[in-house]
Amino acid sequence: MYKIEPVIPKEIEWAERLVHLMDSQFKIPFINFRFGLDPIIGLIPVVGDLVSLAISALIVKSLVTAGMPRKLIFKMIANILLDFLIGEIPVVGDIWDFFNQANRKNLRLARAHFESEHTEIAHQNAPNSVISHAKA
């Protein structure tokens, strides 16, 4: 049985590093809770959320460059806009930023897209075992 590993575009790998920094760089011991710079930057009123939005937009841009379909792009943009808008609410927004990891969600969407795309291609290119055995 042949196993072909999916080819992950370099833009996804770059986005993974930035998402890790923004959403899961730090870990609180004993409770295994991870968070990144996003909620810390978001503690700075208005400016912090704008900086986080800009970084999230860069991540989405890199995923768009990797070839994401329009439907997923709109979903990713909705994720970061929701994160930004709720993040603007004092106190509630700061708590939200620790638990809602929009960049991580967007990365999962991108990975799922490329892995399913790879699976489709692998199935299309897979040799038909009944025919290949009949020819042998």
Image (tube, helix red, strand yellow):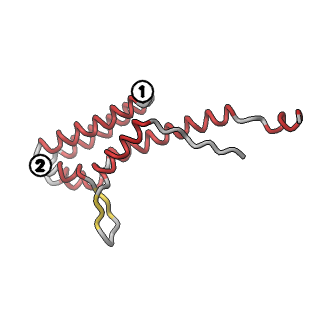
Q: Is residue 132 left or right of residue 96?
A: right
Q: Is residue 34 left or right of residue 135?
A: left
Instruction: Find residue 53 and report its image quarter.
Output: top left
**Disc 2/disc 1 C-alpha distance (Å):** 33 Å
Mark 2 — residue? 44
Instruction: Find residue 70 and report its image quarter.
Output: top left
Looking at the image, which residue is at 53% across and 40% down? 115
Question: Disc 2 on helix, strand or loop?
Answer: loop
Looking at the image, which residue is at 36% across and 40% down? 14
All told, the count of numbered labels is 2
Residue 57, horizontal then vertical, whole percent: 28, 35
Looking at the image, which residue is at 41% across and 42% down? 13
Considering depth in this image, is 97 or 68 the residue closer to the camera?
A: 68
Q: Residue furthest top?
A: 70
Mark 1 — residue? 70
Q: Is residue 30 left or right of residue 95?
A: right
Q: Is residue 135 above or below residue 31?
A: above
Amino acid type assigned to the residue bearing label 2 in the image: Ile
Considering depth in this image, is 6 or 85 the residue closer to the camera?
A: 6
Residue 68, horizontal then vertical, whole percent: 44, 31
Amino acid type assigned to the residue bearing label 1 in the image: Arg
Considering depth in this image, is 104 or 78 the residue closer to the camera?
A: 104
Looking at the image, which residue is at 38% across and 34% down? 63
Q: Is residue 50 left or right of residue 13?
A: left
Q: Earlier in the sequence, mark 2 or mark 1?
A: 2
Question: Disc 1 on helix, strand or loop?
Answer: helix
Residue 127, horizontal then vertical, whole percent: 75, 35
Q: Quadrant of the C terminus?
A: top right
Considering depth in this image, is 57 or 84 the residue closer to the camera?
A: 57
